[in-house]
Image: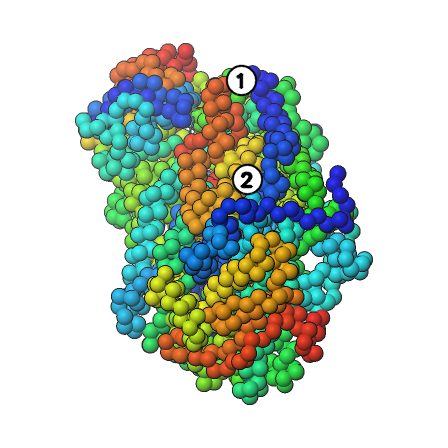
Amino acid sequence: MDAFTTPLLAGAATGALLLIAALGLALTFGQMGVINMAHGEFLMAGAYTAYLTQQVVTNTDISILVALPVAFLVAGLLGLLLEVAIIQWMYRRPLDTLLVTVGVSLLLQQLAKDVFGAQGDPVHTPGWLDGNVDVFGYHWPYRQMFTIVLALAALGALGALLKYTAYGRQIRATVQNRDLAETMGVSTRTVDRVTFFVGSGLAGIGGVAVSLISGTNPNLGTTYIISAFLVVVAGGLGQLKGTVIAAFAVGIVTAYLTDWYSSSMAQVVTFGLVVVFLQLRPQGLFTVRTRGLA
Amino acid sequence: MLELRGVSAGYGRTRVLEDVSLEVPDGGAVAVMGHNGAGKTTLLRVAVGLLPVMRGQVLLDGEDVTRFRPNKRVARGLGYVPQGQLSFPQMTTLENLQLVSTDRAAIDEVLDTFPALRDLLARRAGLLSGGQRQQLAIARTLLTKPRMLILDEPTEGIQPNVVAEIEAVITALTARGDLSVLLVEQHVGFALRSTDAYYVLESGRVTSSGAGGAGALEAVRTAMAV
Amino acid sequence: MNDDYLEIRGLSVEFDGFKAIDGVDLTLLQGRLHFLIGPNGAGKTTLVDAVTGLVPATGLARYRHRDLLHTKSHRIVRAGIGRTFQTATVFEGLSVLQNLDIAGGVHRSAWRMALARRGTPSYVEEALETIGLADLRDKPAGVLAHGQKQWLEIGMLLVQDARVMLLDEPVAGMSAEERAETGELLRRIGRERTIVVIEHDMEFVRSYADVVTVMHAGKVLAEGTVAEIQADPRVQEVYLGRQAETSAAEASQEVDHA
Amino acid sequence: MKHLQKWGPLVGIALIAIALLVVAPAVLSPFRLNNLGKYVCWAIAGVGIGLAWGRGGMLVMGQGVFFGLGGYAMAMHLKLEAAMATGGPDAIPDFMVLYGDGTMPGWWEPFRSGAFTLFAIVALPAVAAAILGWAIFKRRVKGAYFAILTQALAVAFATLLIATIKQTGGFNGLNQFTVFFGYNLYDPVNKKMIYSIAAAVLVVCLLVVWQLYRSRFGELLVATRDAEERVRFLGHDPANIKLVAFVVAAVMASVGGALFAPITGIISPSDVDATASIFLIAGVALGGRALLLGPALGALAVGYGRTSLSESFPDQWTYFLGLLFIVVILFFPAGLGSVWSQAVGRLRSVVRSPAVPKHRTAEPAVDDLEVAR
Amino acid sequence: GGSKSGESSSAESCVDTSGDTIKLGFLNSTSGAMAISEQTVRDSLVMALEEINADGGILGKKIEPVVEDGASDPAVFAEKIEKLLTGDCVAAVFGGWTSASRKAMLPVVEADNGLLFYPVQYEGLEASKNIYYTGATTNQQIIPAMDFLKSKGVKTLFLAGSDYVFPRTANKIIKQYAKELGIEIVGEEYVPLDDDDWTTQVSKIVKAKPDFVFNTINGSSNVGFIKAYYEQGLSPETSPIISVSIAEEEAPAMGKDVTGQFAAWNYFQSVKSPTNEAFIKAFKAKYGDKRPTSDPMEAAYTSLYLYKALVEKADSFDVDKINAAADGVTFDAPEGTVTIDGENHHIAKTGLIGRINKDNQFDVVWSSDAPIEPDPFLKGYSWWDPSGE
Ligand SMILES: Nc1ncnc2c1ncn2[C@@H]1O[C@H](COP(=O)(O)OP(=O)(O)OP(=O)(O)O)[C@@H](O)[C@H]1O
Ligand SMILES: Nc1ncnc2c1ncn2[C@@H]1O[C@H](COP(=O)(O)OP(=O)(O)OP(=O)(O)O)[C@@H](O)[C@H]1O
Ligand SMILES: NC(N)=O
Ligand SMILES: [Mg+2]
Ligand SMILES: [Mg+2]
């Protein structure tokens, strides 16, 4: 039984982590078309925020809870800064954003190393997350459940934002036709900034979750960025539903493969499976088509 | 209402408009005519703010809005229907409208003008036919409740009886006296019927202008048949 | 009878339960300018899409014994059927000349593809003159105005030597003079070709149509000469509208002036 | 004027040839020349990227995979040559004894033959790219999907190499070569020879793309980049057009990798992973992806920049590198080469470069991303 | 043209010994994934250099460091060491961490007949006349750790390592020795170096209930492993860990109280000796009170002093003369007296096992007492079969 449950539950937690990272990307990449390779470093910023918060709020039981909104803010502001300084000039050439943000990612990594040192810093798991519950032989850590809850909460909040507010329509309109949106009275500048802020902020929250797994280190972002992009792509650009399914699918499939073979082979095979999957659904899970050549 | 003063504009290093001046009075309707590539669309893009000027000024209600972004000009009452049946393809017809206003009554009102759209509310705009998209585009702009409509070949691709409908709407709105119109149109007859002044554009310059009406037909034809 | 006609029988196209085309029969003969009109959303573009492999369809569409509904788009083109698009799509990064040259390249061998173009092929030169873009030959097509792009598209069909041309609103956005020029052009090239034109401008239809088919709600509503069509109350009802008479009168006046 | 236009590119290639083949060997120390050789290998891959990305619009983020195929193919041969030089014709590479069970996998066997290796360096990437490209392009995967997919492949490829220590040397990669097709690799004269081969290969690659760019295929490729679906209605299958460019780019990357191994004396997963692939792209972007000479010169410049920046500022150089990416892409979207060609263009007052039109204001940004498809 | 294989040409040294300074190269990754570990090595090299210079230098010449970044990329290490040796004409190079970087530098340093001092414990099975290995080889760290486990009565062992050469080779040795010792290996798991997620693997440890876990994980991945280990309810009481890459620097970075876990090294900050006290004092004075000292940085520090001792014994910076004089050169290092083996260029080191206390320091619980002679090829161990599994 545990051979079945362990990868399922552990994989779901990995998937949740991917989901938080990918949700931000689903906004900045899926909605706005910006390929932000520095998104991983926003994750890293979230992790360092968790560490710094613990220096201030020394009670680790509450510091993580404090860290969540602070990390959202920190990473969000970083994202905003990136948008204002660089991205705003590049909306008409999305593929180029990839290269610019690679540069930003290099800068941020080096900066983290110079500020915090090459050695990682510890982030302590709060007492109430320190433990596990036995699920058919798998000692399911509370921390993993917390990650899943966190991801679902982020998903719910983002989903509501997109669905029930005018902002949701505005962001879609902006990405689909910037000029037209502008002439429909949408302030595309505001939309861009809000979107980048929220998308990057989500990465900050993901970073707090990651810090509970691996503490902090300057290279933390690189670990997640490509999988997160892959999730967004497999899920279909601009479709939250697809992103969710893809995140959990990648997390759980990887966990089973890890269980059966090895971590390395699991990575290789999962990437391979995504490629095969895109053969079947070339535009991702749920991306919708329009007519003609447009 | 809207005034262009000595505007030059273009793309990259190529100039398309050369020292164009034009005025649309409050409640007035102006037609711009010219051959393909004369710069009509460019002129309208400058007016809405999608294209920066190289020289000259754009004034709205006497205020210099040359540096305003389009959405600010829209907030001040400009409504723009671009050429090319543009829509937000991944959003449904209804969402396209709701982007502008979620007021159910207002939406109903424009749907009465374009009844064909009623059956298409749940369809994604990218799946509509060309003419359906154009109707949607006009409806969407009307929904912004503009004080001034800027229309770039609004009847292109629209079936004749709907063209007549659009013409009637424009006439009705201008007749109320609170709507100004700047219209680019290839159907000279339609254009002149709906407006009270015209400008002819040749290679980016205004080569002739005058009062509208049926009498202007001959003048425009000569101006354009160079 | 020669083989050079396009035959459509019982053609249907369905999108998620919505029948955009519903059992259309059409025979398109060589040498006649065939116009396809009908309300927005009647299925005209979809019909062309179906015949050129852009959307899946059922029924039958045949040209020179070739079953078009089961042929890939690029092979349909190779079989001699060309089309333009309702929103003109040309290669923005290439010059007008290059656009035309590429269009003439379908039957070039791999080896000749690897070689550079030397000079301007005569058929490209001819097309440039025909569509009146000779002066703009070195301009990137991306900077052409709307109408110029539409001419370029027609020019591309010319060098492609398409035997069947399906033109989706080719004169939309053109001035009256330009329409007239385009109409004459179509008439000239239409003699040895099968040409289908989708159009809403009734003045243009009146001036150049040999046959008119009216579509409505995915079906063929009527077919005949312009006069027959204009007299058809059903067509007036769904398409031409109450003002059909007045606008016809006005249009003839405009023509007189032209 | 017309002549300049026609022969200008050839003059440029000739200048590069003279600089690399005559001037550099005369003025550079053996070490610097060897370094230059390494950049030349990247430039060879870069030329291919210029074709696929600059002209074909395919942002190939995983060229490390092909670079690696060639690099490892060559390295396997050199490893076997080194083993056979000391241990006789049946000798196997040292690491297989150290980390493995002292047996060699069968698929290594053919690489004992130099001829087979040379064949494999071309055939392996060609076949791999053809299969991959066919699958990807026929399914019309493009834009950002394509970019991220290829990047993921580079990650998977590097992970696979690391995980197969016994067959590929894992994280360590393959190194400690001593002989290159019979020539002693420690002899400076021979190193110079290998450098010259690399430089000559680069020149040949430039000539190949020069011909491709001016050919009708080159125009068709640009057409496919700009309006892929429209190409279908000219009677071409865009997948085939893209496939050709993709395969040519893959082979060039592979050849670059194959020369990289003897020049640097090592090929390891970090030379072929996602980061390495991005650096390949960076050079091309810097130089100007749609230009003829831009990708090669850009790759050389990035290679040189990495070396000299890290020598001058060993602790801060990644800042400079990061800034370089940002500044170049932000301010010179068509690459530094475009500054030059624009200046020339202004002189002639004709812009004939089939590069991306500068102002595409009328188009929605989604076009490049294919969101709307 | 060029010569066919056979006549190996030994490069002429370009080291300039005429001035009153001597150039040495420091080649560590200060960017990329390995910067985490290698930065500390760089720090202690710099400290040793300052001490030596303050003390009059080597043979009266002040050391002039030439610093380079290996960028965590073996090919860069190969390029940079060549640059240091042939361009800057340094007399010796200090650095490298991963075996990949060392393997990449080896042919270069041999071809140029230069010197490399490599300060990290590694998987052995190598000896080059141009490299001095000042970290442990397997019989000075892995094998003592196994002896320690045997002495604790361990019956079952679980192997957890990063997926690269050092852990895989170390585990190959461990498995063969375990068979000899009658210890059963109940699981073996690897995770890529840059991967932090150990959940699935740890759940296998939970299931296997081993007496001990042998940890050959490198770098930041250790954090993920340790967190997953405690999360799933494992503890030093049930299945303690013995690590070969967790030192004083890493222990507090785990974000977990790792008291009671073990590590095998040749140096701990807690080692009691006057030299070590001085070393710790100097280090903290230079880098701050919070920075601990650890085995790799001690080995790096020692390597520079060993070089000084070598040069002074040979009375020359010439590589061949240094090599000729190498055997028996000693240095009173913080870890104790170390001695160079002139044959294999490794050094004799004392094997230590420490247990982590609540201050994240290691209490020595086992010691080989005397320095262990290096045996990189395990010639002295009859159970070792290089081509066995
Ligand atoms: N994005 C652009 N970049 C460069 N040049 C452009 C661009 N858009 C238009 N032009 C050029 O500007 C000129 C005027 O174009 P514009 O679209 O304003 O013409 P128009 O009068 O609206 O024509 P049409 O009746 O065909 O719509 C044309 O010659 C065209 O080549
Ligand atoms: N992929 C699709 N999915 C759903 N509905 C579609 C799709 N494609 C077309 N339609 C619908 O099919 C109908 C026919 O569209 P079509 O574009 O053929 O009309 P048309 O006759 O060309 O109209 P117009 O004159 O406005 O161009 C329209 O109602 C359109 O909304
Ligand atoms: N040599 C090591 N620890 O990689
Ligand atoms: Mg226009
Ligand atoms: Mg249509």
Return the x and y of residue B30 as percentages of the image width and height: 28, 23
Same chain letter for marks 1 and 2: no
What colouring does the structure picture have? rainbow
Using the image, name the chain to which the residue with label 1 belongs.
Answer: C
The residue at 62%/68% (across/down) is E341
Residue A189 visible at all: yes
Q: Is the shortest distance between ligand 1 and the CB of mark 1 under 8 Å?
A: no
Query: Does residue C192 lie above or below A116 as drawn?
Result: above
- Relative to C219, residue E33 above or below: below
Q: Eyeballing the image, is A235 above or below E15? A: below
Q: Residues within 10 Å of mark 2 (few under 14, many from 20)?
A: many
Q: Position of residue C128 (x, y in %)?
A: 56, 19
E235, C219: nearer the viewer: E235
Residue drawn 66% across the image and 51% down it: E111
Q: Secondary structure at mark 2?
A: helix
Viewer-nearest residue: B5 or D14? D14
Q: Amino acid at mark 1?
A: Ala
Q: Position of residue E277 (x, y in %)?
A: 40, 71
User: In percent of the image, x 64 and y 60: which residue is there?
Assistant: E324
Residue C171 appears in the picture as rendered: no
Q: Judge whether B161 appears above or below A69 on screen.
A: above
**Residue wearing tag 1:** C134
Which mark identifies residue D299?
2
Label 2 CB sits under 8 Å from any ligand 3 atom: no
- Which quadrant holds residue E144? bottom right
Quote the CA–CA distance across marks 1 and 2.
Answer: 40 Å
Q: Is residue A38 left or right of residue C134?
A: left
